[in-house]
Image: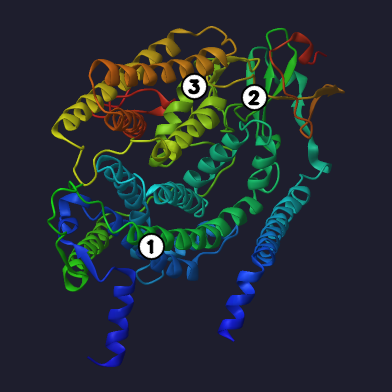
């Protein structure tokens, strides 16, 4: 038996090498399949965890409630409603554009200050100090019958503040 | 000797060689750091199994299960503390182990693959620490995972995809906790176990710990002594002392637990776990793409490829290679610490004076510092090699030490000298600011 075995292996090294490569190939395919399976498991939950569309329109309150130059937190919609100097409205995401911390409005300093990495933003959400790379994201604002309504399902990214972004009466 | 007893001895001997060179038994060669790390991993496995019996991995129950663990389960608080302190000490021990390997020239030919495996082990245990940090679902956990998964978003090309993959959706929620739980209790421990065995086996295959190089003309044979009891007794002494230290420490100090996670309010200051504060310091100064992606990638790649560059390892088995090398490294470490401190303070002034609307910082806080850093390291290398006649190994080791010291200074500043809104503070002063 042993002799047979050795003669066989010396006679066909190519065959042996071919079979070894087959095994390696199947091993890699199996690992790739498992990896793909794991990724599709993880990916499947992305779709299921999309927030429901129904409660995406948030009423922030009547127009008269807000004085120009102030910021009001709207906890239900997780955003800030900034009433600019000219009385127009801007709905700012409370999520820092740097690394996603929640940014509080500092009434005294008149700016948003991020507790994680010290970025600051002004009333219109523009970056005052780095490291934040872009202004705070905004949500579309509509004013219907004197009520300020914000659509929190659409996040709008921007490079700078422009007056067209704010909603007037 | 009874048969059962012999089989246990055989098992221990199977992990060790029959005999070991006597000079590698010196405590001052290795400080037992690798062994300590292994003991801590063992402690973490044991306490982890106990914690799994109580912990509930869902966002509604996780925090409460930790409260039950600490208040109602017998010795629950103690077991949690042991797990916490072992994990934190493991980071310290592993980094010291890495430093020991560099400074005794233990990554040269014959140990290259093991160096790479060691780096993967370091990565795994940092990931393990971090994924465990998330599980209590308290304020610390929630905001650490927010920041960390946001960091993934800056990776070019696949960042957004990776971020959603790890969060299990656009927002942090139940799927995020499930991900990190599985990573922490299944994926990482299994990978860690396999790599650890490989790590140990490769040490044995390389002939044990590093020894002082001997000239071929000397025909003095290496003096070898039996592993049992010589090595086993020493290992037992270090392990038991370490276990005792951890158990006592866990009685005296408790692991932190803040309030339950509140997605509406970040704590101020919101700090990452201490071993990542060096990176958080980088994030304060650099453009995020560079702090999150470019610099860590460059650092990891450099560490990975160091052993494959010829003659980069110091003479084996002697700390710092030589007296000459020791002086160089002391100078490098002190200069590096001062320079890092100077840079941080200088940039702090720059950041606080520039109150204007920030311009795009990709060049000024990204490309420019990267080019300067690489130029600095290359310049120092040529200065040491050409002008000062140091060997390549000494120059490269000085480079590694310089980077590690800079990272340590950043970490220390992050831990003790950053206050609300991450402003610099003096911790000993009254009230901080």
Residue B196 lies in quadrant: bottom left
| Separation (CA) of disc 2 from disc 3 | 31 Å
Residue B234 lies in quadrant: bottom left
Left or right of B120 in this view: B81: left
Question: In the image, are marks 1 and 3 on the same chain?
Answer: yes
Residue A50 lies in quadrant: top right
Q: Earlier in the sequence, mark 1 or mark 3?
A: 1
Furthest residue toward right: A145
**Residue receiving disc 3:** B286
Q: Nearer the viewer, mark 2 or mark 3?
A: 3
**The C terminus of chain B, quarter of image:** top left
**The N terminus of chain B, quarter of image:** bottom left
Observer able to see residue B270: no
Asked if the residue under mark 1 is in contact with the one under mark 2, i.e. CB atoms within 8 Å, the reply is no
**Residue receiving disc 1:** B201
Q: Nearer the viewer, mark 1 or mark 3?
A: 1
Q: Nearer the viewer, mark 2 or mark 1?
A: 1
**Residue receiving disc 2:** A72
Observer able to see residue B168: yes
**Labelled disc at residue B37:** none
Which is more toward the observer, A169 or B324? Answer: B324
What residue is drawn where x is 32% and y is 24%? B425
Report crowding for label 1: few under 14, some 14 to 19, many 20 or more residues within 10 A (C-alpha). some
| Separation (CA) of disc 2 from disc 1 | 62 Å
Question: In the image, are marks 2 and 3 on the same chain?
Answer: no
Position above or below: B389 against A7: above
Q: At which x and y percent is residue A13?
A: 64, 65
What residue is drawn where x is 39% and y is 66%? B47
What residue is drawn where x is 33% and y is 77%? B11
């Amino acid at each position: 038996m042993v002799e047979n075995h050795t003669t066989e292996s010396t006679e066909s090294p190519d065959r042996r090498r071919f079979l070894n490569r087959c095994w390696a190939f199947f091993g890699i395919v199996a690992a790739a399949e498992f990896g793909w399976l794991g990724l599709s498991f993880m990916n499947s939950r992305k779709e299921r965890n999309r927030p429901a569309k129904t409660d995406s329109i948030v009423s922030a309150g009547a127009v008269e409630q807000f004085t120009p130059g102030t910021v009001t937190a709207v906890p239900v919609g997780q955003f800030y409603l900034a009433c600019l100097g000219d009385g127009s409205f801007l709905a700012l995401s409370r999520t820092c554009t740097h690394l996603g911390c929640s940014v509080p409005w500092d009434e005294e300093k008149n700016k948003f200050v991020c507790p994680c990495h010290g970025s600051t933003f002004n009333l219109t959400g523009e970056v005052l100090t780095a490291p934040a790379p872009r202004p705070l994201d905004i949500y579309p604002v509509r004013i219907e019958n004197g009520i300020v309504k914000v659509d929190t399902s659409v996040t709008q990214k921007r490079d700078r503040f422009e007056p067209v972004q704010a909603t007037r009466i | 000797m009874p048969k059962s007893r012999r089989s246990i001895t055989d098992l221990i001997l199977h992990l060790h060689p029959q005999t070991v060179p006597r000079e590698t038994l010196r405590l001052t060669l290795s400080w037992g750091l690798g062994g300590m790390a292994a003991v801590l991993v063992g402690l973490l496995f044991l306490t982890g199994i106990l914690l799994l019996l109580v912990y509930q991995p869902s966002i509604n129950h996780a925090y409460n299960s930790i409260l039950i663990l600490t208040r109602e389960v017998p010795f629950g608080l103690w077991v949690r503390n042991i797990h916490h302190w072992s994990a934190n000490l493991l980071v310290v021990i592993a980094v010291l182990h890495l430093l020991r390997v560099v400074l005794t020239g233990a990554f040269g030919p014959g140990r290259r693959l093991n160096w790479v495996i060691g780096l993967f082990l370091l990565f795994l245990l940092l990931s393990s620490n971090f994924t465990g940090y998330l599980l209590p679902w308290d304020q610390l956990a929630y905001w650490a995972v927010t920041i960390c998964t946001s960091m993934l978003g800056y990776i070019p090309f696949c960042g957004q995809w990776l971020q959603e993959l790890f969060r299990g959706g656009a927002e942090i929620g139940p799927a995020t906790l499930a991900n990190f739980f599985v990573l922490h209790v299944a994926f990482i421990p299994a990978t860690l176990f396999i790599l650890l065995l490989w790590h140990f086996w490769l040490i044995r295959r390389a002939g044990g710990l590093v020894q002082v190089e001997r000239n071929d003309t000397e025909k003095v044979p290496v003096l070898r002594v039996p592993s049992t009891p010589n090595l086993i007794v020493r290992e037992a002494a270090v392990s038991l002392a370490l276990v005792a230290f951890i158990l006592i420490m866990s009685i005296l100090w408790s692991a932190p637990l803040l309030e339950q996670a509140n997605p509406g309010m970040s704590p101020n200051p919101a700090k990452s776990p201490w071993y990542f504060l060096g990176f958080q310091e980088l994030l304060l100064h650099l453009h995020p793409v560079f702090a999150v992606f470019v610099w860590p990638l460059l650092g990891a790649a450099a560490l990975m490829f160091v052993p494959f560059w010829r003659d980069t390892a110091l003479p084996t088995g002697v700390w710092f290679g030589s007296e000459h090398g020791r002086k160089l490294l002391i100078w490098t470490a002190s200069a590096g610490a001062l320079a890092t401190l100077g840079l941080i303070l200088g940039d702090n002034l720059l950041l606080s004076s520039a109150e204007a609307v920030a311009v795009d910082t990709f060049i000024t806080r990204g490309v420019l510092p990267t080019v300067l850093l690489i130029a600095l390291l290359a310049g120092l290398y040529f200065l040491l090699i050409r002008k000062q006649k140091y060997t390549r190994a000494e120059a490269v080791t000085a480079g590694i030490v310089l980077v590690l010291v800079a990272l340590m200074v950043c970490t220390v500043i992050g831990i003790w000298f950053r206050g609300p809104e991450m402003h610099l503070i003096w911790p000993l002063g009254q009230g901080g600011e």
